[in-house]
Image (cartoon, rainbow, N blue to C red):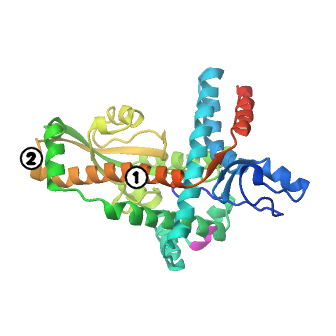
Protein backbone atom coordinates (compact mmCIF):
# COMPACT_ATOMS: atom_id res chain seq x y z
CA UNK A 1 0.00 0.00 0.00
CA UNK A 2 1.15 3.59 -0.67
CA UNK A 3 -0.41 6.98 -0.49
CA UNK A 4 1.74 8.80 -3.07
CA UNK A 5 -1.29 10.07 -5.00
CA UNK A 6 -1.66 12.84 -2.45
CA UNK A 7 0.64 15.82 -2.41
CA UNK A 8 3.79 15.85 -0.30
CA UNK A 9 3.89 17.01 3.37
CA UNK A 10 5.38 20.39 4.28
CA UNK A 11 6.32 20.74 7.94
CA UNK A 12 8.69 23.56 8.95
CA UNK A 13 9.29 24.56 12.56
CA UNK A 14 10.90 27.96 13.01
CA UNK A 15 12.19 28.69 16.51
CA UNK A 16 12.21 32.48 16.18
CA UNK A 17 10.58 35.35 14.29
CA UNK A 18 12.88 36.24 11.45
CA UNK A 19 11.59 38.71 8.89
CA UNK A 20 8.69 40.97 8.12
CA UNK A 21 9.00 41.53 4.36
CA UNK A 22 11.18 41.10 1.27
CA UNK A 23 14.47 42.32 -0.21
CA UNK A 24 16.24 44.96 1.94
CA UNK A 25 13.47 44.93 4.55
CA UNK A 26 14.50 41.72 6.33
CA UNK A 27 15.00 42.21 10.01
CA UNK A 28 16.92 39.37 11.69
CA UNK A 29 16.66 39.12 15.43
CA UNK A 30 19.53 36.65 15.98
CA UNK A 31 22.27 34.60 14.29
CA UNK A 32 20.06 31.50 14.35
CA UNK A 33 17.48 33.45 12.35
CA UNK A 34 20.12 34.32 9.77
CA UNK A 35 20.94 30.64 9.46
CA UNK A 36 17.26 29.91 8.82
CA UNK A 37 17.04 32.59 6.10
CA UNK A 38 20.08 31.00 4.42
CA UNK A 39 17.94 27.90 3.89
CA UNK A 40 15.21 29.88 2.08
CA UNK A 41 15.25 29.53 -1.72
CA UNK A 42 12.16 31.64 -2.50
CA UNK A 43 9.70 34.04 -0.91
CA UNK A 44 6.08 33.87 -2.07
CA UNK A 45 4.17 36.89 -0.75
CA UNK A 46 4.33 36.35 3.03
CA UNK A 47 5.35 32.68 2.77
CA UNK A 48 8.65 30.91 2.04
CA UNK A 49 9.97 27.91 0.12
CA UNK A 50 12.73 26.26 2.13
CA UNK A 51 15.74 24.34 0.93
CA UNK A 52 14.41 21.43 3.01
CA UNK A 53 11.18 21.34 0.98
CA UNK A 54 12.98 21.57 -2.32
CA UNK A 55 15.49 18.83 -1.49
CA UNK A 56 12.71 16.60 -0.15
CA UNK A 57 10.70 16.84 -3.39
CA UNK A 58 13.76 16.32 -5.56
CA UNK A 59 15.12 13.30 -3.67
CA UNK A 60 13.08 10.55 -5.44
CA UNK A 61 14.02 11.91 -8.88
CA UNK A 62 17.66 12.38 -7.90
CA UNK A 63 17.94 8.75 -6.82
CA UNK A 64 16.44 7.55 -10.11
CA UNK A 65 18.63 9.85 -12.23
CA UNK A 66 21.76 8.57 -10.50
CA UNK A 67 20.86 5.04 -11.64
CA UNK A 68 20.43 5.99 -15.31
CA UNK A 69 23.05 4.90 -17.81
CA UNK A 70 23.64 8.50 -18.90
CA UNK A 71 26.86 10.49 -18.93
CA UNK A 72 27.67 12.68 -15.93
CA UNK A 73 26.88 15.79 -18.00
CA UNK A 74 23.45 14.45 -19.04
CA UNK A 75 22.64 13.57 -15.42
CA UNK A 76 23.65 17.06 -14.31
CA UNK A 77 21.36 18.63 -16.92
CA UNK A 78 18.45 16.45 -15.80
CA UNK A 79 18.96 17.31 -12.14
CA UNK A 80 19.14 21.04 -12.84
CA UNK A 81 15.88 20.80 -14.85
CA UNK A 82 14.16 18.77 -12.10
CA UNK A 83 15.29 21.30 -9.48
CA UNK A 84 13.90 24.17 -11.55
CA UNK A 85 10.57 22.40 -12.20
CA UNK A 86 10.11 21.37 -8.56
CA UNK A 87 10.87 24.88 -7.30
CA UNK A 88 8.22 26.31 -9.63
CA UNK A 89 5.73 23.65 -8.49
CA UNK A 90 6.35 24.52 -4.84
CA UNK A 91 5.86 28.23 -5.60
CA UNK A 92 2.59 27.45 -7.38
CA UNK A 93 1.38 25.42 -4.39
CA UNK A 94 2.10 28.32 -2.05
CA UNK A 95 0.16 30.71 -4.31
CA UNK A 96 -2.79 28.31 -4.54
CA UNK A 97 -2.87 27.77 -0.76
CA UNK A 98 -2.80 31.53 -0.20
CA UNK A 99 -5.70 31.97 -2.61
CA UNK A 100 -7.63 29.27 -0.74
CA UNK A 101 -7.31 31.37 2.42
CA UNK A 102 -8.21 34.59 0.62
CA UNK A 103 -11.39 33.11 -0.87
CA UNK A 104 -12.30 31.32 2.38
CA UNK A 105 -13.08 28.04 0.61
CA UNK A 106 -15.49 26.05 2.86
CA UNK A 107 -14.21 22.87 4.44
CA UNK A 108 -15.33 20.20 6.92
CA UNK A 109 -13.21 17.62 8.78
CA UNK A 110 -15.86 15.07 7.76
CA UNK A 111 -14.57 15.43 4.19
CA UNK A 112 -11.17 14.17 5.40
CA UNK A 113 -12.85 11.30 7.29
CA UNK A 114 -14.70 10.26 4.11
CA UNK A 115 -11.56 10.50 1.96
CA UNK A 116 -9.53 8.36 4.38
CA UNK A 117 -12.34 5.79 4.57
CA UNK A 118 -12.30 5.53 0.75
CA UNK A 119 -8.51 5.09 0.76
CA UNK A 120 -8.73 2.30 3.35
CA UNK A 121 -11.49 0.53 1.40
CA UNK A 122 -9.58 0.87 -1.89
CA UNK A 123 -6.50 -0.68 -0.28
CA UNK A 124 -8.48 -3.25 1.73
CA UNK A 125 -6.80 -2.37 5.04
CA UNK A 126 -8.02 -1.99 8.61
CA UNK A 127 -7.50 1.24 10.56
CA UNK A 128 -4.63 -0.38 12.43
CA UNK A 129 -2.94 -1.49 9.18
CA UNK A 130 -3.52 1.99 7.77
CA UNK A 131 -1.70 3.61 10.73
CA UNK A 132 1.13 1.09 10.41
CA UNK A 133 1.60 1.99 6.74
CA UNK A 134 1.67 5.69 7.60
CA UNK A 135 4.31 5.02 10.25
CA UNK A 136 6.46 3.21 7.67
CA UNK A 137 6.38 6.36 5.55
CA UNK A 138 7.27 8.53 8.53
CA UNK A 139 3.83 10.13 8.83
CA UNK A 140 1.49 10.60 11.77
CA UNK A 141 -2.27 10.47 11.27
CA UNK A 142 -2.43 14.23 12.00
CA UNK A 143 0.12 14.95 9.25
CA UNK A 144 -1.68 12.72 6.79
CA UNK A 145 -5.04 14.34 7.58
CA UNK A 146 -3.46 17.73 6.86
CA UNK A 147 -2.23 16.44 3.49
CA UNK A 148 -5.71 15.19 2.59
CA UNK A 149 -7.22 18.51 3.68
CA UNK A 150 -4.81 20.43 1.42
CA UNK A 151 -5.62 18.16 -1.51
CA UNK A 152 -9.39 18.58 -1.02
CA UNK A 153 -9.09 22.37 -0.77
CA UNK A 154 -6.90 22.59 -3.87
CA UNK A 155 -9.45 20.56 -5.80
CA UNK A 156 -12.24 22.85 -4.57
CA UNK A 157 -10.49 26.06 -5.59
CA UNK A 158 -9.84 24.68 -9.08
CA UNK A 159 -13.57 23.92 -9.30
CA UNK A 160 -14.50 27.43 -8.13
CA UNK A 161 -11.88 29.47 -9.99
CA UNK A 162 -11.70 27.48 -13.21
CA UNK A 163 -14.02 24.55 -13.90
CA UNK A 164 -17.27 26.36 -13.05
CA UNK A 165 -16.50 28.97 -15.73
CA UNK A 166 -15.89 26.57 -18.64
CA UNK A 167 -18.58 25.97 -21.25
CA UNK A 168 -18.18 23.62 -24.23
CA UNK A 169 -20.68 24.24 -27.06
CA UNK A 170 -21.87 21.87 -29.78
CA UNK A 171 -20.12 24.13 -32.31
CA UNK A 172 -16.84 23.56 -30.45
CA UNK A 173 -17.40 19.79 -30.58
CA UNK A 174 -18.31 19.79 -34.28
CA UNK A 175 -15.28 21.91 -35.20
CA UNK A 176 -12.94 19.58 -33.30
CA UNK A 177 -14.49 16.49 -34.91
CA UNK A 178 -14.09 17.86 -38.43
CA UNK A 179 -10.48 18.92 -37.84
CA UNK A 180 -9.58 15.56 -36.30
CA UNK A 181 -11.69 13.17 -38.34
CA UNK A 182 -8.73 10.76 -38.73
CA UNK A 183 -8.85 10.07 -34.99
CA UNK A 184 -12.37 8.66 -35.31
CA UNK A 185 -11.79 6.33 -38.23
CA UNK A 186 -11.61 2.55 -37.80
CA UNK A 187 -8.92 1.73 -35.22
CA UNK A 188 -7.58 -1.15 -33.15
CA UNK A 189 -8.25 -0.69 -29.42
CA UNK A 190 -6.65 -2.52 -26.49
CA UNK A 191 -8.83 -3.34 -23.48
CA UNK A 192 -6.51 -3.03 -20.46
CA UNK A 193 -6.57 -3.79 -16.76
CA UNK A 194 -3.83 -2.95 -14.28
CA UNK A 195 -2.55 -3.52 -10.78
CA UNK A 196 -0.70 -0.48 -9.48
CA UNK A 197 1.30 0.26 -6.36
CA UNK A 198 2.27 3.90 -6.12
CA UNK A 199 5.61 5.36 -5.15
CA UNK A 200 5.84 6.30 -1.48
CA UNK A 201 5.40 9.91 -0.39
CA UNK A 202 8.83 9.95 1.23
CA UNK A 203 11.25 8.10 -1.03
CA UNK A 204 13.69 5.62 0.47
CA UNK A 205 15.39 2.66 -1.16
CA UNK A 206 13.85 0.45 1.52
CA UNK A 207 10.30 1.64 0.81
CA UNK A 208 10.71 1.12 -2.95
CA UNK A 209 12.08 -2.38 -2.38
CA UNK A 210 9.10 -3.16 -0.13
CA UNK A 211 6.67 -2.12 -2.90
CA UNK A 212 8.49 -4.23 -5.48
CA UNK A 213 8.50 -7.19 -3.12
CA UNK A 214 4.69 -6.97 -2.81
CA UNK A 215 4.26 -6.77 -6.58
CA UNK A 216 6.63 -9.68 -7.15
CA UNK A 217 4.49 -11.76 -4.78
CA UNK A 218 1.39 -10.75 -6.78
CA UNK A 219 3.14 -11.62 -10.05
CA UNK A 220 4.01 -15.03 -8.65
CA UNK A 221 0.33 -15.66 -7.81
CA UNK A 222 -0.74 -14.54 -11.29
CA UNK A 223 1.74 -16.96 -12.87
CA UNK A 224 0.28 -19.69 -10.65
CA UNK A 225 -3.16 -19.02 -12.15
CA UNK A 226 -4.73 -16.40 -9.83
CA UNK A 227 -7.46 -14.23 -11.38
CA UNK A 228 -6.11 -10.83 -12.46
CA UNK A 229 -9.42 -9.15 -11.60
CA UNK A 230 -9.40 -10.62 -8.08
CA UNK A 231 -5.78 -9.62 -7.49
CA UNK A 232 -6.53 -6.09 -8.71
CA UNK A 233 -9.52 -5.80 -6.37
CA UNK A 234 -7.47 -6.98 -3.41
CA UNK A 235 -4.17 -5.21 -3.97
CA UNK A 236 -4.30 -2.43 -6.58
CA UNK A 237 -3.97 1.16 -5.33
CA UNK A 238 -6.31 2.58 -7.94
CA UNK A 239 -9.78 4.10 -8.10
CA UNK A 240 -10.53 1.27 -10.57
CA UNK A 241 -9.57 -1.48 -8.12
CA UNK A 242 -13.22 -2.26 -7.35
CA UNK A 243 -13.73 -2.81 -11.09
CA UNK A 244 -10.94 -5.39 -11.17
CA UNK A 245 -8.46 -2.79 -12.43
CA UNK A 246 -10.50 -2.17 -15.60
CA UNK A 247 -8.95 0.81 -17.41
CA UNK A 248 -11.05 0.57 -20.58
CA UNK A 249 -10.07 0.77 -24.26
CA UNK A 250 -6.93 2.47 -25.57
CA UNK A 251 -5.32 2.93 -28.95
CA UNK A 252 -1.57 2.31 -28.91
CA UNK A 253 -0.88 5.92 -29.87
CA UNK A 254 -2.72 7.19 -26.79
CA UNK A 255 -0.32 5.33 -24.46
CA UNK A 256 3.05 6.59 -23.28
CA UNK A 257 5.98 5.06 -25.22
CA UNK A 258 7.03 2.93 -22.23
CA UNK A 259 3.56 1.44 -21.69
CA UNK A 260 2.93 1.13 -25.44
CA UNK A 261 6.08 -0.98 -25.85
CA UNK A 262 4.79 -3.33 -23.15
CA UNK A 263 1.16 -3.55 -24.29
CA UNK A 264 1.80 -4.14 -28.00
CA UNK A 265 3.78 -7.29 -27.15
CA UNK A 266 0.94 -8.80 -25.09
CA UNK A 267 -1.58 -11.29 -26.39
CA UNK A 268 -5.20 -11.25 -25.14
CA UNK A 269 -5.37 -12.94 -21.74
CA UNK A 270 -1.71 -12.23 -20.94
CA UNK A 271 -0.17 -9.94 -18.30
CA UNK A 272 3.09 -8.01 -18.29
CA UNK A 273 6.07 -7.96 -15.97
CA UNK A 274 6.34 -5.11 -13.44
CA UNK A 275 6.61 -1.74 -15.21
CA UNK A 276 8.02 1.35 -13.47
CA UNK A 277 5.87 4.32 -14.58
CA UNK A 278 5.42 7.93 -13.45
CA UNK A 279 2.28 6.92 -11.56
CA UNK A 280 3.90 3.95 -9.81
CA UNK A 281 4.83 0.30 -10.39
CA UNK A 282 2.24 -1.44 -12.58
CA UNK A 283 1.35 -4.83 -14.00
CA UNK A 284 -0.81 -4.65 -17.14
CA UNK A 285 -3.31 -7.23 -18.37
CA UNK A 286 -4.66 -7.31 -21.94
CA UNK A 287 -8.31 -8.33 -21.79
CA UNK A 288 -8.83 -8.30 -25.55
CA UNK A 289 -8.23 -6.36 -28.77
CA UNK A 290 -11.19 -4.75 -30.51
CA UNK A 291 -11.46 -3.28 -34.00
CA UNK A 292 -13.59 -0.16 -33.66
CA UNK A 293 -15.54 1.16 -36.63
CA UNK A 294 -15.57 4.83 -37.65
CA UNK A 295 -17.37 6.97 -35.07
CA UNK A 296 -20.03 9.43 -36.13
CA UNK A 297 -20.18 12.91 -34.60
CA UNK A 298 -23.00 11.77 -32.29
CA UNK A 299 -20.98 8.75 -31.14
CA UNK A 300 -17.88 10.84 -30.51
CA UNK A 301 -19.77 13.72 -28.89
CA UNK A 302 -19.19 12.91 -25.21
CA UNK A 303 -15.58 11.86 -25.80
CA UNK A 304 -14.80 15.15 -27.60
CA UNK A 305 -16.63 17.21 -25.00
CA UNK A 306 -14.52 15.64 -22.24
CA UNK A 307 -11.31 16.15 -24.23
CA UNK A 308 -12.08 19.82 -24.94
CA UNK A 309 -13.13 20.36 -21.33
CA UNK A 310 -9.83 18.96 -20.02
CA UNK A 311 -7.85 21.02 -22.52
CA UNK A 312 -9.63 24.19 -21.42
CA UNK A 313 -9.17 23.33 -17.74
CA UNK A 314 -5.42 22.95 -18.25
CA UNK A 315 -5.25 26.12 -20.34
CA UNK A 316 -7.22 28.22 -17.84
CA UNK A 317 -5.35 26.70 -14.90
CA UNK A 318 -2.01 27.84 -16.37
CA UNK A 319 -3.47 31.28 -17.08
CA UNK A 320 -4.86 31.50 -13.53
CA UNK A 321 -1.51 30.55 -11.99
CA UNK A 322 0.24 33.13 -14.15
CA UNK A 323 -2.22 35.75 -12.92
CA UNK A 324 -1.54 34.78 -9.28
CA UNK A 325 2.20 35.17 -9.90
CA UNK A 326 1.76 38.53 -11.61
CA UNK A 327 -0.35 40.06 -8.86
CA UNK A 328 1.74 38.52 -6.05
CA UNK A 329 5.34 38.96 -4.99
CA UNK A 330 7.61 36.03 -5.86
CA UNK A 331 11.31 36.39 -5.14
CA UNK A 332 13.64 33.50 -6.06
CA UNK A 333 17.13 33.56 -4.53
CA UNK A 334 18.95 32.72 -7.76
CA UNK A 335 22.40 32.88 -6.17
CA UNK A 336 21.47 30.14 -3.70
CA UNK A 337 19.97 28.06 -6.52
CA UNK A 338 23.17 28.57 -8.51
CA UNK A 339 25.26 27.42 -5.54
CA UNK A 340 23.11 24.28 -5.26
CA UNK A 341 23.53 23.57 -8.97
CA UNK A 342 27.30 23.78 -8.59
CA UNK A 343 26.99 21.02 -6.00
CA UNK A 344 25.25 18.85 -8.57
CA UNK A 345 28.55 18.59 -10.47
CA UNK A 346 29.60 15.89 -8.02
CA UNK A 347 27.03 13.44 -9.37
CA UNK A 348 28.41 10.19 -10.75
Q: Nearer the viewer, residue 195 or 327?
A: 327
- Residue 201 painted magenta: no
Q: Where does the image place residue 343, in percent across and percent down from the top left?
A: 75, 31
Q: Where does the image place residue 201, in percent across and percent down from the top left?
A: 60, 54
Residue 223 visible in the snapshot: no
Q: Which structural element holds mark 2?
A: loop
Query: Quadrant where the C terminus lies?
Result: top right
> Main SS type for the magenta part?
helix
Q: Is residue 20 left or right of residue 129?
A: right
Task: Determine contact: label 1, label 2, CB under 8 Å.
Answer: no
Within-10-Å neighbours for mark 2: few <14, some 14–19, many 20+: few
Residues shaded magenta? 127-131
Residue assigned mark 2 = 296
- Residue at the far right: name it: 31
Q: CA distance from mark 1 to mark 2?
A: 40 Å
Q: Nearer the viewer, residue 279 or 108?
A: 108
Q: Quadrant of residue 64?
A: top right
Residue assigned mark 1 = 226
Residue 82 visible in the snapshot: yes
Within-10-Å neighbours for mark 1: few <14, some 14–19, many 20+: few
Q: Give above or below for 58 relative to 4.
A: above
- Residue 128 painted magenta: yes
For the point 11% across and 45% down, the residue is 295
- Residue at the far front: name it: 24
- Mark sitting earlier along the chain (1/2): 1
Amino acid sequence: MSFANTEKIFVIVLSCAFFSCMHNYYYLTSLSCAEIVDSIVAVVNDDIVSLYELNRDIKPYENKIRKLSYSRYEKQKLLVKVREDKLNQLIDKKLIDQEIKNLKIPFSEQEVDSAIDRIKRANNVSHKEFLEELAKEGLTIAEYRQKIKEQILRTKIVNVAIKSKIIITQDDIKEYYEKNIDKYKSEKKYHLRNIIMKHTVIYTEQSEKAILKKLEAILKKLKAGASFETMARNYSESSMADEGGDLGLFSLNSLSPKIRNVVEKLKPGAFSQIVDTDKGYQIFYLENIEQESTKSLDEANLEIEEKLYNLKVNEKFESWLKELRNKGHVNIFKKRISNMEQGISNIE
